[in-house]
């Protein structure tokens, strides 16, 4: 490492010793260093300089073969040590600082000088520079406009509390850090016994400690006032205080560690990362605060999101604007395309003006970085039609929603440009020239999908090139320094074929794939096919390799050649884009329910609407959320979705592609080649293009529907917040009402009190009252006293039940002067006659309480009103909503997604997408209203609007508030934003017009022109942007007909104050010809200010006039839904609901209450059909009855909600299925629906028949196949379950356990004969009853199975293990053959006989079927196991002799190298089933159903030993695999190879009868 170029010490060292190797540790001279300034050594060392330099040169220039003796090195070290001590002694005598001097210096500077660094050493070449910061982003701080003109000059800080430190830390430290590698301690005498490596380690440790000490010293504020020259004087007088370090290095080693100051504590060391992120103190947050870019433009997500991330895209350039405008305009909307670009569009003459307006919008957004509200408010002239010759023609080319759409599309185009540039860079790294890519593909890459397709196409075509060429690097990719590429796990069939001779065969098709595409996209067909002289098969025969180990036919070679061409066609970006465009227009969608969906989605299920959707055009899916519901149903595995092209569209595309590929010749050979080309096109469509189009169309449709649904929710929010505060008839514009909010909670008289809260016009809580009721006179007087004392402008009523309507009625009665008696909660309460009391003209209203419900339990409410009850906080939320709905919704932040704007569909929108849509609406309305900046600084609740101001955000708004607070918390004019460095340039331009500083009528602008810096400006209270102040002043001057001399020396905005205060200002301003003024400005400077001039005029008349609509009154259904949760859907006529009888009146009217609390009434006409039945004989109080909704009566002014019901039997018997049924989509597959209904009914009947059947037998259970297997899983081998059969009532299924996880299902047919019923398994095995079937069939087979499993040749486990055992045996005994038996897992109850004739043969497998009386080898029955072995040996020997005579050895007659078939064709084994994967149907040759009723089986016959217990446990057990240990061989016990679970007595019987074959083969 080298020091700075200008370092004089370093220059001397390198001049004398250019070949410094770093192996000698000689000192050239001593130097002291203060803040990076080197000071030359004392003169005492001059006498040794020549000797030192000579020795150094001699030490560096050494012969390689020269060896230095240890004795010489030791003497040299001793001499250096003595010389160093003499030097220190002289320095101690002449220049030593006294202790008092050091203490005085330390007292004045605040630091220690006892451990200063003294030596400068020669740098080592091998030492690496200090590593750079691991952080990807530099830490930044809030800065003024000057700070942010150049991002590279941002100060680097390590702690948020050191943001405003002076530049002391940056001065001097850099020089010292550069000299770190030259600094060392004079401790050679202490380390005389250490070798070079140990000494070097100690030096590095000392240097590390000194760097830490210097960093700690740098943070001491007392040193900030001492500059470099002062330090020089201090060192000249006092020295550096480190002359004794050479003697104290070893003793003070621990003291140095203690004196070294610890690094300052950072907030990262204290807080959790999640807390730091929540407080917006991360590096990204610092970067967002510092950059002169609007905050929302820096984020890739909503600023409300808890996981907001930076958007690191590069902005567009001026050269990109034209292309971007054309790209965005074509995708703006279908209506815009139709109106402006179609031949008969009404606005076709203005299409150029539309493109120009889009280009202006993109320039403002992505180059000048203005937010949408700024453009909409202050740059409207540039996005509207403006023609000086047609100045009165007003056409809004772009709406506000379309301006947001341009912003989104511009972001997509910006991403496209970035990826497209990365693609072109990757192509350039190929160092190749591809005419097709450069001339055909490159100009048409206008979508992100085409970029991806082109990348894939290049990767496929130039696969042999270096892989790094195709690595596309974007700005937000992680930097990878050392990357090891993982080799591909497999090679595709295309790559194999492409590298083989088949690629030459593919060229024989006469045209290359990209030429086909060129023919396809052009109308003149520039490429022609070269016809072959040979037909395809003959041509392919030329490429057959006779020496290949794997023989391939010409047809196979042609297939692989077609695969190459189809793959290249399917990968072509232009074809893929064409198929995507075709899907976008012509695709259709169908839905097919799964087996689960058929049963679960009934007529009342919300998914029933699309359960059998069939051939619905995709264009009709864009206007509703149906597709999102379909995807939700698919994720629940209820339906399968298919998106496809219509047959006409697919056929048209295929025909065009065939025409581009086919030859024009008419010969038979040309026709044969055209057929091959047609197969290529078909394969390219089916294997590549159609799947690509389907996948893309699915995602595109999902995105479009989500965007449309999010925009719809945003419009719903706009309806709620784009309204002015509640205003009475005599309210002044801009006045916020004082509100009394009152709530009864859930309306329980025994539990809930009435809570009242008063908020004044500034939103401050003035009074909080709680009373028990409004019936008692004392409480009523207290309520009226509150009204007299506070005089609220409006009373807001809210609650959580329908009882709130009674509270509202009581409040209205008191206000109107009517005194009523009784508890409003009592059902029998009725308003009596009027009584004269004081009348209050105060409106009583309901407001939406969804925000208040969230607020009452929020952390924000707990911080603002910690002493209030939840109901009181709820009332605060109601009152605030009446005062400013916008502020209430803005204060929710990310919780705004909890508000339901679309009940059934909102949950289908991704949260982040919904947040963005809602935030845009909040931003629009907030900037439409404006924010009073001084109030935002002092009012924490009102401050929630500030982040929504154009250009700001949560981080910048918080920083702005803190900066204003440091200035006193009050701004006088907008100029202070710049002059006091409160906002940077772009942020000021964005936000200035929306930050309002209200005009104080008592304060007049200074008359002195030069005193306007700190004076108020009336224009700051308007929507006029500071850049248009001169226009406003000019307009005011002209309206007042003043000359420049008249306003000379006055405040620039003095004329504005005059016109604002003029009583006739409206007439004077209207007399101005603003149209002519706008034309003159355009002709002079091309400024478009027509709309701006009109805005200025309106603002001069009414500054920040209310532009929102009036506060809306809730509709009756909205109030009912808010209080009860009922909707028109849940209370529609015809529905049957459950109600509770409350009371029965004398007039036979029955009053009821619904579950939601709404009152219901049953009039005598709707009690019974007869009409002469007394209700008291039918009902009693407290009884729950079923009733039909007849009508819903809603009288909001009287606070009366009532449901008319009917209990007539004629109404109830009809049911409400017709009313509850979900409506089908018009594209409905009726045939499939009816088929599934029929199948469901058939299954239901079969299930009913199966469940009705009862057979009295201990082994009978109503199980299906899987249940029977689960039941037998823990039973012994041979156990039986008899169960119903799915084949009908004349069938039974018998399941018995063959082995662990192996079960045989036997189908038994019940046949009625004259002599009685017969249970038939097959033609040979028929039984009279179940016990005979179990004993003589199942148990007989089980005995045969156990006998064979007990044989020594039987091998447990899978068949592969037996094969391995046979191979190992033959390998060990080459002269012998081997055979063995194993269970056939595919056919339970069967065995496989596997044998290996010799070591060169393959393992052969013969089937062995087990019947109750014999074993069948190839259907040849044998009685026992020995006979089976003998039959096998004889048969094999006979076949071997025949094969030997025929010249073929070691093979079975069933084909070389293959297994012997498991059974002889023509013979079907009864009851053959698989192990687990079989359905519940058991095969049987007796398929017919006997009409006779099934016989009844009695329980008198005792069950055999294989019978099941009478009451076995039942349940679905998890299968378990366990092994029975083999018993050890001993006297009286069966042989060790007896399988587990076999009866020992039976095993002994088999052994004694010679059942086991002990002999070899």
Image: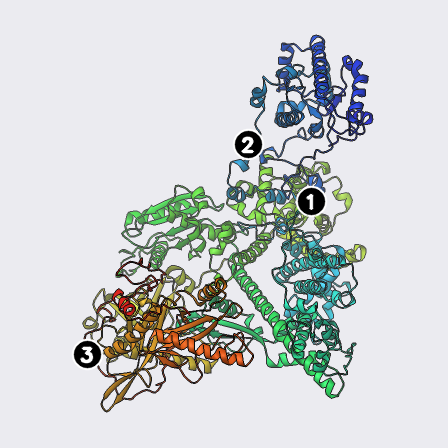
Give the distance between the C-alpha atoms of the residues marked 2 and 1, in whole angstroms: 34 Å
Q: Which residue is mark 3?
A: 1498
State which tag comes first along the sequence, 1 or 3: 1
Q: Which mark is residue 985?
A: 1
Q: State the quadrant of the N terminus.
A: top right
Res. 1478 visible in picture: no
State which tag comes first along the sequence, 3 or 2: 2
Give the distance between the C-alpha atoms of the residues marked 3 and 2, in whole angstroms: 89 Å
Left or right: 1515 with respect to 864?
left
Give the distance between the C-alpha atoms of the residues marked 1 and 3, in whole angstroms: 99 Å
Name of the residue lying farthest toward the left: 1500
Where's residue 1416, x and y in %? 38, 79
State which tag comes first along the sequence, 2 or 1: 2
Quadrant in the picture for residue 489:
bottom right
Q: Which residue is mark 2?
A: 265
What secondary structure is found at the residue carrying circle 1? helix
Asked if labels 2 and 3 touch by Cβ distance under 8 angstroms, the answer is: no
Where's residue 400, x and y in %? 62, 60
């Amino acid at each position: 490492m080298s020091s700075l170029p200008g370092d004089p010490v370093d220059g001397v060292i390198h001049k004398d010793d250019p070949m410094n190797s770093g192996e000698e540790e000689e000192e050239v001279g001593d130097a002291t260093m203060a803040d990076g300034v080197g000071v030359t050594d004392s003169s005492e060392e001059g006498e040794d300089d020549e000797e030192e330099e000579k020795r150094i040169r001699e030490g560096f220039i050494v012969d390689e073969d020269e060896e230095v003796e240890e004795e010489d090195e030791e003497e040299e070290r001793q001499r250096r040590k003595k010389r160093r001590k003499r030097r220190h002694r002289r320095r101690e005598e002449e220049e030593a600082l006294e202790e008092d001097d050091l203490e005085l210096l330390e007292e004045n500077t605040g630091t220690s000088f006892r451990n200063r660094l003294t030596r400068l050493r020669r740098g080592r070449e091998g030492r690496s520079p200090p590593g750079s910061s691991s952080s990807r982003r530099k830490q930044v701080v809030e800065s003024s406009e000057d700070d942010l003109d150049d991002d590279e000059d941002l100060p680097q800080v390590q702690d948020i509390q050191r943001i405003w430190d002076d530049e002391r830390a940056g001065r001097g430290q850099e020089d010292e850090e550069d000299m770190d590698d030259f600094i060392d301690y004079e401790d050679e005498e202490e380390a005389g016994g250490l070798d070079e490596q140990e000494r070097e380690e100690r030096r590095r440790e000392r240097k590390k400690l000194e760097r830490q000490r210097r960093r700690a010293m740098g943070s001491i504020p007392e040193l900030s006032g001492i500059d470099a020259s002062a330090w020089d004087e201090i060192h000249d007088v006092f020295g550096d205080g480190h002359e004794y370090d050479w003697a104290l290095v070893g003793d003070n080693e621990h003291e140095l560690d203690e004196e070294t100051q610890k690094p300052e504590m950072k907030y990262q060391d204290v807080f959790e990362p999640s807390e730091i992120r929540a407080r917006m103190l991360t590096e990204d947050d610092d970067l967002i605060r510092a950059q002169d870019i609007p905050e929302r433009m820096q984020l890739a997500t909503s600023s409300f999101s808890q996981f907001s991330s930076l958007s690191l895209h590069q902005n567009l350039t001026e050269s990109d604007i034209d292309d971007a405008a054309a790209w965005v305009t074509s995708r703006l909307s279908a209506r815009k395309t139709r109106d402006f670009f179609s031949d008969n569009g009404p606005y076709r003459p203005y299409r150029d003006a539309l493109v120009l307006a889009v280009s202006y919008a993109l320039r403002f957004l992505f180059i000048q970085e203005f937010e949408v509200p700024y453009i909409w408010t202050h740059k409207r002239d540039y996005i509207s039609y403006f023609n000086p010759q047609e100045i009165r023609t007003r056409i809004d080319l772009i709406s506000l929603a379309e301006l947001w759409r341009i912003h989104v599309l511009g972001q997509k185009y910006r991403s496209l440009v970035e990826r497209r540039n990365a693609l072109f860079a990757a192509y350039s790294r190929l160092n190749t020239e591809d005419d097709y890519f450069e001339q055909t593909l490159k100009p048409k890459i206008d979508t992100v999908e085409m970029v991806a397709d082109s990348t894939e196409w290049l990767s496929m075509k130039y696969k042999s090139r270096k892989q790094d060429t195709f690595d596309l690097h974007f700005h937000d990719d992680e930097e990878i320094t050392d990357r090891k590429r993982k080799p591909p796990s497999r090679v595709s069939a295309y790559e194999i074929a492409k590298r083989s001779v088949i690629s030459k065969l593919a060229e024989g098709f006469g045209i290359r794939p990209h030429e086909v595409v060129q023919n396809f996209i052009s109308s003149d067909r520039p490429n022609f096919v070269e016809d072959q002289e040979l037909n395809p098969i003959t041509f392919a025969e030329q490429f057959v390799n006779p020496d290949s180990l794997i023989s391939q036919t010409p047809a196979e070679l042609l297939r692989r050649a077609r695969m190459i061409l189809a793959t290249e066609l399917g990968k072509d970006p232009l074809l893929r884009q064409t198929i995507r465009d075709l899907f976008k227009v012509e695709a259709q969608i169908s839905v097919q329910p799964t087996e689960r969906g058929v049963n679960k989605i009934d007529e009342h299920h919300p998914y029933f609407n699309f359960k059998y959707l069939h051939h619905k055009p995709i264009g009709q899916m864009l206007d509703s959320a149906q597709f999102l519901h379909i995807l939700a149903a698919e994720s629940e595995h209820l339906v399968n979705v298919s998106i496809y092209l219509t047959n006409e569209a697919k056929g048209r595309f295929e025909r065009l592609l065939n025409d581009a590929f086919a030859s024009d010749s008419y010969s038979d050979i040309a026709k044969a080649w055209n057929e091959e080309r047609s197969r290529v096109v078909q394969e390219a469509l089916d294997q590549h293009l159609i799947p690509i189009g389907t996948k893309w169309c699915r995602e595109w449709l999902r995105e479009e529907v989500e965007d449309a649904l999010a925009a719809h929710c945003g419009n719903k929010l706009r309806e709620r917040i784009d309204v002015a505060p509640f205003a009475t008839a005599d309210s002044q514009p801009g006045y916020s009402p004082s509100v009394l909010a009152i709530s009864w909670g859930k309306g329980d008289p025994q539990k809930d009190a009435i809570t009242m809260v008063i908020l004044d016009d500034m939103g401050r809580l003035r009074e909080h009252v709680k009373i028990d009721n409004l019936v008692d006179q004392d409480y009523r007087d207290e309520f009226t006293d509150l009204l007299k004392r506070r005089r609220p402008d409006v009373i807001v009523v809210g609650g959580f039940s329908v009882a709130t309507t009674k509270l509202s009625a009581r409040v209205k009665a008191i206000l109107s002067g009517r005194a009523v008696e009784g508890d409003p909660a009592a059902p029998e309460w009725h308003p009596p006659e009027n009584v004269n009391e004081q009348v209050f003209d105060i409106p009583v209203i309901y407001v939406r309480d969804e925000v208040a419900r969230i607020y009452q339990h929020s952390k924000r409410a707990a911080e603002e009103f910690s002493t209030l009850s939840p109901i009181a906080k709820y009332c605060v939320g109601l009152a605030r909503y009446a005062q400013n709905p916008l502020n209430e919704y803005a204060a929710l932040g990310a919780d705004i997604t909890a508000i339901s704007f679309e009940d059934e569909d909102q949950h289908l929108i991704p949260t982040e997408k919904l947040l963005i849509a809602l935030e845009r609406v909040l931003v629009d309305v907030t900037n439409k209203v404006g924010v009073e900046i001084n109030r935002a600084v002092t009012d924490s609740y009102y401050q929630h609007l500030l982040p929504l101001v154009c250009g700001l955000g949560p981080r910048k708004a918080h920083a702005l508030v803190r900066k204003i607070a440091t200035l006193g918390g009050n701004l006088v004019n907008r100029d202070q934003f710049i002059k006091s460095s409160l906002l940077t340039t772009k942020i000021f331009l964005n936000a200035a017009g929306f930050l309002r500083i209200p005009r104080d009528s008592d304060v007049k602008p200074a008359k002195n022109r030069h005193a306007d810096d700190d004076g108020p400006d009336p224009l700051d209270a308007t929507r006029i942007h500071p850049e248009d102040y001169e226009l406003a002043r000019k307009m005011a001057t002209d309206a007042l007909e003043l000359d420049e001399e008249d306003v000379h020396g006055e405040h620039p905005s003095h004329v504005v104050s005059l016109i604002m205060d003029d009583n006739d200002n409206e007439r004077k301003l209207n007399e101005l010809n603003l149209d002519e003024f706008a034309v003159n400005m355009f002709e002079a400077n091309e400024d478009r200010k027509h709309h701006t001039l009109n805005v200025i005029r309106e603002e001069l008349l009414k500054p920040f006039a209310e532009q929102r609509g009036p506060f809306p009154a809730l509709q009756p259904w909205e109030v009912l839904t808010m209080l009860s949760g009922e909707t028109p859907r849940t209370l529609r006529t015809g529905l049957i609901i459950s109600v509770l009888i409350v009371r029965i009146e004398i007039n036979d009217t029955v009053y009821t209450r619904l579950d939601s609390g709404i009152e219901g009434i049953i009039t005598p006409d709707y009690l019974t059909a007869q009409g002469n039945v007394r209700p008291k004989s039918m009902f009693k109080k407290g009884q729950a009855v079923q009733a039909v909704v007849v009508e819903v009566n809603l009288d909001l002014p009287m606070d009366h909600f009532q449901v008319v019901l009917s209990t007539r039997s004629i109404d109830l018997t009809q049911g409400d299925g017709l009313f509850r049924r979900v409506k089908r989509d018009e594209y409905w597959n009726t045939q499939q629906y009816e088929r599934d209904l029929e199948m469901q009914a058939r299954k239901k009947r079969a299930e009913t028949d199966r469940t009705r059947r009862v057979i009295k037998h201990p082994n009978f259970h109503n199980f299906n196949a899987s249940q029977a297997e689960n039941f037998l899983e823990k039973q012994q081998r041979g156990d039986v379950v008899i169960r119903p059969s799915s084949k009908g009532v004349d069938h039974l299924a018998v399941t018995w356990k063959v082995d662990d996880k192996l079960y045989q299902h036997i189908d038994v047919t019940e046949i009625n004969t004259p002599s009685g019923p017969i249970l038939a398994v097959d033609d040979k095995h028929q039984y009279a009853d179940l016990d005979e079937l179990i004993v003589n069939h199942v148990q007989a087979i089980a005995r045969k199975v156990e006998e064979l499993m007990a044989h020594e040749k039987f091998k447990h486990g899978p068949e592969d293990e037996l094969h391995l055992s046979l191979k190992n045996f033959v390998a060990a005994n080459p002269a012998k053959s081997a055979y063995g038996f194993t269970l056939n897992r595919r056919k339970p109850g069967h065995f496989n006989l596997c044998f290996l004739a010799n070591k060169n043969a393959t393992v052969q497998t013969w089937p062995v079927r087990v019947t109750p009386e014999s074993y069948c080898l190839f259907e040849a029955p044998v009685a026992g196991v020995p006979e089976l072995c003998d039959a096998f040996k004889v048969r094999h020997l006979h076949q071997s002799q025949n094969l030997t005579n025929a010249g073929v050895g070691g093979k079975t007659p069933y084909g070389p190298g293959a297994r012997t078939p498991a059974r002889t064709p023509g013979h079907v084994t009864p009851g053959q089933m698989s192990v687990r994967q079989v359905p519940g149907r058991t095969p049987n040759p007796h398929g017919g159903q006997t009409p006779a009723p099934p016989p009844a089986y009695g329980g008198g016959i005792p069950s055999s030993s294989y019978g099941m217990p009478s009451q076995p446990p039942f349940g679905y057990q998890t299968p378990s695999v366990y092994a029975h240990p083999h018993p050890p061989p001993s006297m009286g016990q069966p042989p060790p190879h007896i399988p587990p679970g076999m009866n020992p007595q039976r095993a002994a019987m088999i052994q004694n009868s010679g059942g086991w074959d002990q002999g070899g083969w």
